[in-house]
Amino acid sequence: MGKKYMAGAEPFLIKKGPVGCLLIHGFTGATHEMRQLGDYLAERDITVMAPCIAGHGTRVEDLNETRWPDWYASARAALDELKGMCETVFVGGLSMGGLQTLHLATHDRDVRGFLCYAAPVYVRNWKLQLFEPVMRNTPLLKVYRYDKGIADDIKDKEAIKTHVSYDKTPTACVLSLVDYMNHVKADLGEIKAPILIFQAREDHTVHPGNAEVIFKAVGSQDKQIVMLDNSYHVITVDFDKQTVFEKTYEFIQKHL
């Protein structure tokens, strides 16, 4: 029996031309946050695949059973599948999906270019910094299993109404996400492919300074940052989404 997904969290594939783009959703989020971008690209003959990352799109308890290697394995499997369909492939990801995009970029030399939408490689959160050692080294983690949801950092209030995400966040998964950031950050210099980095100035989830850290660390010669002025974190559905869509397509066209 197949998985029972939340409405709007189903993985999707839109088969079009020989150029493909993998779109990876964020931590505790769902494919819904990549759907409008996917439709925009598909209308321009780009084949689009958006996987549901392990532990996501079903129940938050399922996420609590996974860690970052599981999330990466989901993205890796989807990329391999898309490469089997398309002659040329790009990868883009939002938030943790952007972190996964960077991870894929450190290993995969066959992808033509990478797009990071509000990708984190470090966390600036005093509560997490204060309590992380306690969480890791005491039984408190077994008691404090869930924190509030984090996936609705959206300026457009209408977009919040239809956003699909978990309303809780597994604490152990947050710690795993921090480990994942540290793992990927150490290898950013290995990235040589063209990369486009999007970041909102008013992001409350990923500190805007992450964009500059990524930009300086990657080994790519062809790299650019696009700063957005009228969005919060989930930039693929927020007020600046049209800019995100257009510049994504321009990047793909430029690197064919």
Image (spheres, rainbow, N blue to C red):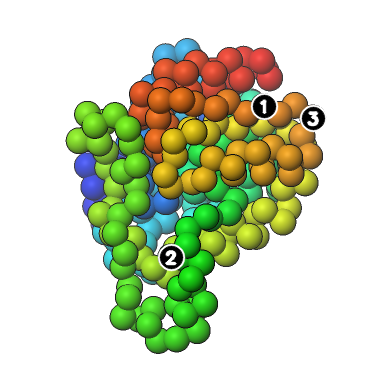
The residue that appears at 35% across and 29% down in the rendered structure is: 237
Cα gap from disc 1 to disc 2, whole angstroms: 32 Å
From the image, tell me which residue sits under label 3: 221
- Mark 2, secondary structure of its residue: helix
From the image, tell me which residue sits under label 1: 224
Q: Where is residue 217 in the image (x, y as percent from the top left)?
A: 74, 44
The residue that appears at 59% across and 44% down in the rendered structure is: 210
**Which of the numbered marks, if any, corresponds to residue 45?**
none
Q: Position of residue 208 (x, y in %)?
A: 54, 40
Going by the numbered disc 1, the residue's amino acid type is Gln
Going by the numbered disc 2, the residue's amino acid type is Lys
Q: Which quarter shows the C terminus? A: top right
Which is more foreground, mark 2 or mark 3? 2
Q: In this view, does 252 lie above or below 216?
A: above
From the image, tell me which residue sits under label 2: 127
Which is more foreground, mark 1 or mark 2? 2
